[in-house]
Image (cartoon, grey):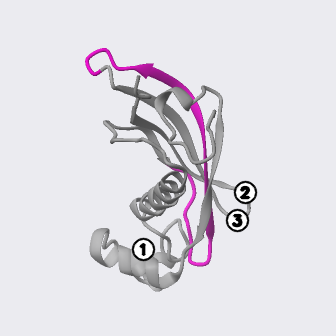
Amino acid sequence: MRRNKGAMIYFEDMDVGARHEFGSKTVSREEIVDFATQYDPQPFHLDDAAAAMTPFGRLAASGWHTGAMTMRIVVDAWSDKGFMGVGSPGLDELRWLKPVYPGDTIRVSSEVVAKRESRSRPNLGSVWSDVLVHNQDDVLVMKYTSIVMMLRRPA
């Protein structure tokens, strides 16, 4: 990524092959249960005894919770750097590969794999990145391909 200190990061600054490290977060049992209570109230996200009878073996975070934590880590990191993302049409190939347990620390990284100027909106471009989420043991727990619309550098 090419960037001048204090400058905004535009579509033109994103290089295919560039890798980014975004940060990490440790998840608590309380956060897992609170998220699941509101958004994914399946027993293995809420109750130790119920979770013990599943392939998880113990209480595990919802995949959607892992995704939400990942989004927060990415948004915080990019916001601090002046990233000019203006939305997303979605993501591809979301996979929850391993459970995230209470006390786990997830860390997020990405690699830019493609980019394309918009044909219909000359002020925008799209950037595709493979996003990887690892736990504290360097085990890949989640991955997906992000598609972000970015502002192009003003003429």
The residue drawn where x is 28% and y is 75% is: 38
**Dot 2 corresponds to which residue?**
138
Magenta includes 140? no
Give whichever of discs 2 and 1 has the lower sequence position: 1
Q: Residues within 10 Å of mark 3 (few under 14, many from 20)?
A: some
Residue positioned most to the top: 119
Mark 2 or 1: the one toward you: 2
Q: Which residue is label 1 attached to? A: 44
Q: Splitting the image into 4 quarters, where does residue 107 fall?
A: bottom right
**Quadrant, the C terminus:** top left
Cα distance, mark 2 to mark 3? 5 Å
Q: Report the front residue among 134 and 13.
A: 13
Secondary structure, mark 1, is helix
Residue at the (34%, 39%) spot, across then down? 88
Q: Position of residue 18 (x, y in %)?
A: 65, 33
Q: Residues within 10 Å of mark 1 (few under 14, many from 20)?
A: many
Q: Are marks 2 and 3 in contact (CB under 8 Å)?
A: yes
Asked if residue 139 lies left or right of residue 110, the reply is right
Disc 3 residue type (three-letter): Gln
Q: Which mark is on residue 136?
A: 3
Query: Which residues make up the magenta segment?
Result: 96-121
What residue appears at the point 56 percent right and 72 percent down from the top-left corner? 101
Q: Position of residue 134 (x, y in %)?
A: 64, 56
Q: Position of residue 104 (x, y in %)?
A: 62, 71
The answer to whether 117 is drawn above or below residue 73 in the figure is above
Q: Mark 2: which amino acid?
A: Asp
Residue 26: image location, x then y, percent: 59, 73
